[in-house]
Image (cartoon, rainbow, N blue to C red):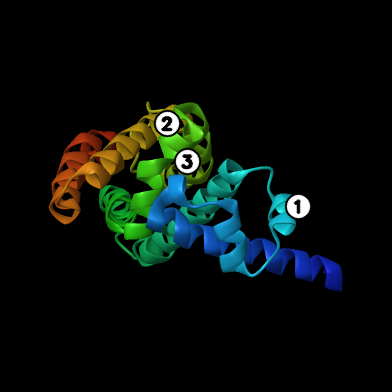
Amino acid sequence: MVVKTRREEYAALTRAAIVDSARTLFVDPGYADASIDAIAAAARVSKGAVYHHFADKRAIFEEVLRSELRSGIEQVVARTADSQRQDGFDGRAFALAGATEMLTLFGTDPVKRSLLQQGPAVLGSERIRRVDEGQVLPLIRAQLTTIAERGQLRPELPIPLTARIVYGLLLAAAGAISADPDPDAASEAATRVVDRMITGLFVRPEDR
């Protein structure tokens, strides 16, 4: 077990305070109006301390977004864990449960929704794709692997490619939900669309 020094503990606490304060300010008043000075003041650290941990405001935004994606993925995993352990495992239901949790969380949670909406303009489409993909894609691969191990994913479908395609579908769906004036209704509709589109990935019950 690695024990952190007092200096390392203080640095970690300072960085966390900066990220927490920036998260709040990036949502309201928004990235464009959230200055480094305001972030430092909210975190109760010096402006120099902010720049010690982050190169610029975009780097802070990227860290905030990574943190939100990571916490979201942890919630999705926790909420779908029971269905993975149940007898009579249903791969399609397991996949849809994960997709539903993901779309609901990232499409309707006000903090995640705001950050995802601002992300492309702040980081650029390619950088935001790498950040998002690095957090979400491993979860999709893991879920498909679980389904395949239970013999319920069509064997002709390669998991890495299938995961990327499903990831693209969910990314588009989450973007549509976050941009809709009624995200709750959009989330329900998007879940139905995703269900129809991924159903063909799985071995039918009568063929098992």
* Vertical order, 6 against 202 (above or below): below
Q: Which residue is mark 3?
A: 132
Kindly report which numbered mark, 1 or 3, lies closer to the viewer in this rendering. Answer: 1
Residue at coordinates 68% horizontally, 48% vertically from top-left? 54
| Secondary structure type for disc 3 | helix
Q: Of the residues under marks 1 and 3, which one precedes in the sequence?
A: 1
Measuring from the top left, give residue 178's x and y in whole percent: 27, 46
Q: Residues within 10 Å of mark 1 (few under 14, many from 20)?
A: few
Mark 3 neighbour class, 10 Å CA radius: few under 14, some 14 to 19, many 20 or more: some
**Residue where numbered disc 2 is placed:** 164
Q: Residues within 10 Å of mark 2 (few under 14, many from 20)?
A: some
From the viewer's side, name the closer residue of 132 and 77.
Answer: 132
Kindly identify the amino acid type of the residue bearing the numbered disc 1.
His
Q: Picture quarter containing residue 118?
A: top left
Q: Residue 83: percent from the left, percent from the top?
A: 34, 63
Frontmost residue, 73 versus 181: 181
- Residue name at image x 49 percent, y 52 percent: 34
Q: Please report whichever mark, 2 or 3, sits nearer to the chain's N-terminal start.
A: 3
Q: How far is the residue under mark 2 from the one under mark 3?
A: 12 Å
Provide the residue designation for mark 1: 52
Say what secondary structure mark 1 lies in: helix
Residue 50 occupies quadrant: bottom right
Alpha carbon of mark 1 to alpha carbon of mark 3: how far? 25 Å
Q: Sequence order check: which comes first, mark 2 or mark 1?
A: 1
Depth check, mark 2 against mark 1: the one in front is 1
**Residue at position x 16%, y 38% from top?**
196
Of helix, strand and loop, which one carries label 2?
helix
Depth order, front residue of 91/118: 118
Q: Is residue 40 left or right of residue 177?
A: right
Q: Is residue 150 visible from the viewing direction of this image? A: no
Q: In which quadrant will I find the N terminus?
A: bottom right
